[in-house]
Image (cartoon, coloured by chain):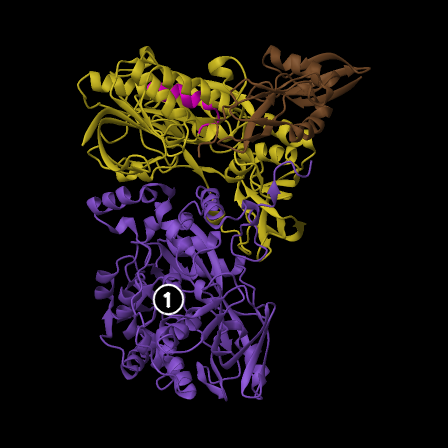
Amino acid sequence: MTTRTLTCIGCPLGCTLNVALEEGRVVSVSGNTCKKGDDYAHKECVAPARTVTGTVRISGGSLPVCSVKTAQEVPKDKIFEVAAALAEIRASAPVSIGDVLAENVAGTGVSVVATRHVAEKTA
Amino acid sequence: METYDIVIVGGGPAGLAAAIAAKKAGIDRLLILERDSELGGILNQCIHSGFGLHTFGEELTGPEYADRYIRQVRELNIPCQLQTMVLDISPERVLTVTGREHGLQQIAARAIILAMGCRERPRGALNIPGYRPAGIYSAGTAQRLVNMEGYLPGKEIVILGSGDIGLIMARRMSLEGAHVKVVAEVLPYSGGLKRNIAQCLDDFGIPLKLSHTVIDIDGKERVRGITLAEVDENRRPIPGPEEYIPCDTLLLSVGLLPENELSSSAGVTLDSVTGGPVVTESLLTSVPGVFACGNVLHVHDLVDFVSEEASRAGSNAAAYLQGGEKAEDASVCLVGKKGVRYTVPQLLDVHQMPEQLTVRFRVGQSYRDASLCVWFNDTCFRRIRKRIMAPGEMEQFTLRRADLPADLHTITFTVEEDAK
Amino acid sequence: MYDVIVIGAGAVGCSIARELSRYQLRLCVLDKNEDVCEGTSKANSAIVHAGFDALPGSKKARFNVLGSQMMEELSHQLDFAYRRNGALVLCFDEADRPKLQELYDRGVTNGVEGLRILEKEALHAMEPAVTQEAVAALYAPTSGIVCPFGMTIAMAENACENGAEFRLNTEVQSLRRAGDHFVVTTAAGDLETRAVINAAGVYGDILHNQICEKQVHIVPRKGEYCLLDRKDGHLVDHTVFQLPGKLGKGILVTPTVHGNLLMGPTAADQDAREGTNTTAAGLAESISKARCSVPDLPLRDVITSFAGLRAHLVDGEDDFVMQQSAPGYFEAIGIESPGLTAAPAIGVYMAQLAAESLHLSKKENFKAQRKGIVNPQELSFPERQELVRQNPAYGNIICRCEQISEGEILDAIHRPLGARSLDGVKRRVRAGSGRCQGGFCGPRVMELLSRELKEPMTDLTKSGGASRLVVGLTKEEL
């Protein structure tokens, strides 16, 4: 049996989780103060995933970039591939919050959505 | 001179929530003054997620969180002047404001809500020796350049200070193509949230060096490197092995300071610990009709608490106007002692207070298995065991009016370390 | 072929240029930096010394007193910030009284007006924040404070308006005589001139040694300073010096013309002519010695620290060298303290020297007046309102700490010898010199520079050269 110590990222509390693993499977989680910690520990030990936030270049907008996020979490080991893929996405203003700017980013099956409005540039 | 019922200084999370609450409480002649070209304040550059768990039950990014409030402001037709800077507030609540569109004007307000937020402590405040080249940025300035303007401040980064903005920027710089070499923290613990250490540093293999600081900056024109040294418990560099780290950028995340120059001009009494106004339970400052909320009052960890506090400021300001602008009789003092650095509010009018009142405070150092004690005058009213308390995490305690004794004059918060 | 090339665009070089521009000539000022006032002139105590310090009979004494006498009128003519706030030299020990008296006598001999020795009570009545340890003080009412950038830039702009050509970013690689003229070699090519004036500060010896047989050596003498927030500028009203004594060479505490509080400088000789780095020891010394004068300095209000280099001539007579050292070769070297004060008088003297030698005649249309950048904060409310109405850019605040408007910054960029960098803007209008040190306004000023100069953000610098502010767009390295 092996143990892992994790910091829960489920909320700002940041509980320290002690996870017991057997052959790669989680057998117990302690230290969490809510169910999120338990869920996080299971996922982090088996298939860690993160929401990636970043920016996408926008043409003709009041700002040159628009903030975005992955609509769902992507596998943790794909974070840099997703970041690189964001660099290739081009969109033009106006952009509204929630607009899908790209689908299936870096082959993850997850979309990239705008997290802010970018108006068209006024002369 | 144009007169408003309530003028809200700042259109960030605090100002927005305050304005919405005041409007909903029936105040019509109100105005938000915002210096930027859009509402939302610092949230617009905080593009990471983690906002809104308390308020909306989901994790939003900064701009998304701001948008929820901005939409309400629009729906409620609350007027705002953007790109408008307040230059001065007089004790008589006359604001001198300036902007491209409306020019230089004076505005009178029956009540003012201070919601100016905070600013970053700059390099100068640390007096780090060395050169003064390009490539030294406060983390928030770098955040704006990267997240809103699309520029990369540098490629080889050292971050001094492990406040949340520093941690968040370590990840952001990594994701935008820079290499973050180390985050150094002068204290033996991080001032940031634990989960940010996990997902912003650990995820990216960025080392965090506690009890370390930058003792020299090299490079006459652009940063060429920094020298890192370990410090003792008094934060003084320990002579001995120093590490020279080549880099082109030094980001500083070394603390936030409530931005109270306008409060001072209005004659508001400031708390020397928080750097923000001394307020009563209704968030009223020492100047009649002037309220304060959000990071201008004390630096918060979570925007959710800012919004909640600001809503109270908005409804309290409305109630103050609707109740005939009565002065308070805030005769009870709240004080932090023995490990508790400060409390907000600092004053309490028992007759005005709601059934329950949340008091927020911070401890001055990290505690493990200690007790938080609440004293009514000289009597310990409650002793709460805490597994962990840290300066980076704001604490709170809910006072119930029913519990308060009749002869109450002081409520004291202390940390008592349990006998081993 | 120029008539005169002035090498060095510091306070001395710009003053000489301004005075020379009264004459009909082809005049050029060279500087290796991207702006004027980038060397010693930008990092010093910003004091207009009364003139009691220098040895009677020295050039330091003579030009100090002359400069101090000229400053008031010059500040009106050229529109820069100057205030005669008076100075106090503290005596901490009864045993040092003879030294205080000596300083007084020296001042009287030098022609300094209004000197008085104050006893403890009078001293504290005048300056309550001063330490109780002080037993007496020399009071010099003619001492003043000046904006060193404001003064230097004003002189440069005025010289420019009167026909002087400024070639910045132009380092002199070598200087040689070629028959009846000189060849000045720069990276941008050779320049020819009938006369050269060396005002090259800490590089003055290098130029001198290329022309003159008798070699000289300048040692950069570093002085480190700490600057406090404007809210502390009222702590003292006078410039507070220390009598050289058991503390060693003293440290001053002074308000600045912009209302900050300044303390420093240390004095340490070094080799590096570009070594303007501060050191832990230097800053600690500045602070601890400043506290001897003013015990209750609010040190948590330090907003920045900096170091400047004085051009100390080692093998001379501990005095300014101002002369024609070889035919057609003039020099003002070893201009350490009180150089800033003396600069206006040095300019007059050196210009006359060169003009006589070259038989220059005066222009008829010399413009002696120069209008500075409008500071809206100095206007009345209706005046300021009217300014904003006429030009809304003055209503748009860019620097929140110092409340500097877009209008002022645009003026700083577009006037003659305008700002090209973040520091250039800062020295002209103070955007970024407040308590957040450009954290808020930095990116905004960059946007204005980029827009007005039509340069991409990625080319903008903090202060020229390799001091680029951003290294590129995001994502380029992904």
Please give the chain letter of the residue carrying mark 1: C
Q: Is residue B197 left or right of residue A60?
A: right
Residue C201: % across, % down = 49, 72
* Quadrant location of the C terminus of chain C in the rendered image: top right
Residue C466: % across, % down = 59, 55
Residue B214: % across, % down = 58, 48
Residue C215 or residue C12, whichever sits in front: C12
Q: Which chain is yellow?
A: B
Q: Label 1 is placed on what type of residue?
A: Glu
Q: Which chain is purple?
A: C
Q: Quadrant of residue A39?
A: top right
The number of discs equals: 1
Q: Is residue A50 left or right of residue B311?
A: right
> Magenta includes A86?
no
Q: Secondary structure at mark 1?
A: helix
Q: Is residue B345 left or right of residue B161?
A: left
Is disc 1 surrounded by few (<14), some (14 to 19) or many (20+) residues within 10 Å?
Answer: some
Residue C457: % across, % down = 54, 45
Q: Colour of chain A?
A: brown
Residue B135 or residue C47, whichever sits in front: B135
Instruction: Look at mark 1 in the image and give the residue it sits on.
Output: C161
> Magenta includes B301?
yes
Regarding residue B231, the answer to whether it shows in the image is no
Q: Is residue A94 left or right of residue C250?
A: right
Q: Which residues are magenta?
A: B300-312
